[in-house]
Image: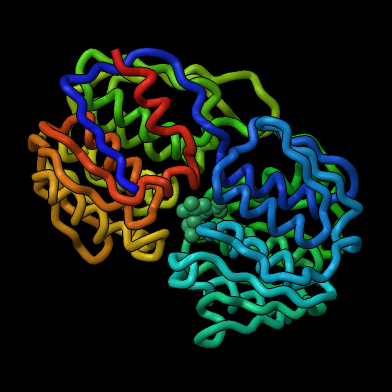
Amino acid sequence: MTLKLNYENPSLRGTVQVPGDKSISHRAIMFGAMASGVTKVEGFLLGDDCLSTISCFRKLGVEISLTGKQVTISSQGKEAWKEPEEVLDTGNSGTTTRLMLGILSGTSFHTVMAGDESIAKRPMKRIVNPLREMGADIRGRQDGQYTPLAVQGARLTAIDYTMPVASAQVKSAILLAALEAEGKTVITEPVSSRDHTEIMLKHFGADITRQNGVIELKGGQKLSAANVQVPGDISSAAFMIGAALITENSEVTLTNVGVNPTRTGILDVIENMGASYDLKELEVEGERAANITVRSSKLTGTEIGGELIPRLIDEIPLIALLATQAEGTTVIKDAEELRVKETDRIAAVVAELSKMGADIEATEDGMIINGPTPLNGAEMNSYGDHRLGMMAAVAALKAGGQVEIHDPDCISVSYPDFVGQLNSLLK
Ligand code: S3P
């Protein structure tokens, strides 16, 4: 299937509620399934990735019902889970695969996980190694580097672990295994990554501390059910923000967007690039949220690297597109993690934006972009990667001709109605 987009001098005006945060939605299902009692989740992301998480827990015998964006999870805790008869299908979701590895390592039964072609290429040793140090019994292709992965539940012991890469998925898998492990697990994070797991563990009654980049959690803690309000996903909002910034006469308000400081690197970057936007923080419990209003802006190039990278890692395809419309040079470095996302996002972003006439060059750990350049219509690939698909759709707003996106269905991994919502803002 292809998606054909052809815009003529578009302006975007109006208000949008972007779908629920993907990271928080996954965790709400996982924590609700681990806890005893009934957990209600509001604002859940009905994207393919989070639906994969639901289907995996149903196969473990957890009762999960969906009514609109509300999910109800009824569980009697991990002890009541049963050995699944089928392979757990994690679809395109790295978060499902990796966090579940941590959760399943400490059970008393056997499971097998496998996902799609993209998941089969994503490195798992970064999780498997620390989990094996804890006593986990995990087998997979190339000594556990790739799916399918078989997990035989085992008795775990706590570890003291220093994270070699800033990855919330690795950190979370260890923390979720640590709940079952004997002793106190200590994780040192030289560069901090998103902390939704730590926040939600507290919310479900766990005792977890963090001081100067050191996280501590004692094993043997049981979670109790708690309701979760999922704010809008800033990684999805980023594409609407970008669309408003690069089109003329635009003003868009995004309501109830999650603004956890470990996720707001995109706002720092657009501010540096000269964007005009306002943020009004909302009074909510748990994860922070805000309404964000963005206007058409004249952008300038910027430099992005170091500790900022984990705070905006999923937004780099969109930032690269903004840089093509900004005056001057943008340098993105220290972002080698992009090479092992849903696709190699450095190679894919450079290939796709080059087709449209951008002046963009790949480096080992990022890219260099000179702007502004006019963009032309082109046939674009999504590489089955939702964020590449959305980058192409936003780029179409500036293209002087038709943009045809191949395999656009992948957008539903994180933002099922993205194109519909974008078009609803057209004036
Ligand atoms: C996520 C963590 C990040 C991010 C991914 C979601 C999470 O991955 O890119 O989209 O929910 O923990 P890494 O942990 O690999 O950096």
Q: Residue furthest front?
A: 1
Where is residue 286, by image quadrant?
A: top right
Left or right for 116, reference 341: right
| Residue 261, percent from left and from top | 51, 37
Depth order, front residue of 135/93? 93
Q: What's the colour scheme?
A: rainbow
Q: Nearer the viewer, residue 387 or 274?
A: 387
Give the mark count: 0
Q: Is residue 178 left or right of residue 182?
A: left
Q: Which residue sits at x=66%, y=23%? A: 284
Task: State the residue at coordinates (28%, 16%).
Answer: 250
Residue 295, horizontal then vertical, whole percent: 30, 17
In front of the other: 408 or 69:
408
Image location of residue 320, percent across then percent down: 24, 44
Residue at position x 34%, y 64% from top?
Answer: 339
Residue 231 is situated, as x and y percent measured from the top left of the image, at 59, 31
Residue at 67% across, 74% down? 112
Judge whether 321 appears above or below 407 on screen. Answer: above
| Residue 316 visible in the shown view | no
Query: Residue 232 is drawn in which quadrant?
Result: top right
Residue 30: tell me if it is visible: yes
Q: Is residue 207 above or below residue 101?
A: above
On screen, residue 220 versus residue 370, left or right, reads right
Q: Quadrant of the C terminus?
A: top left
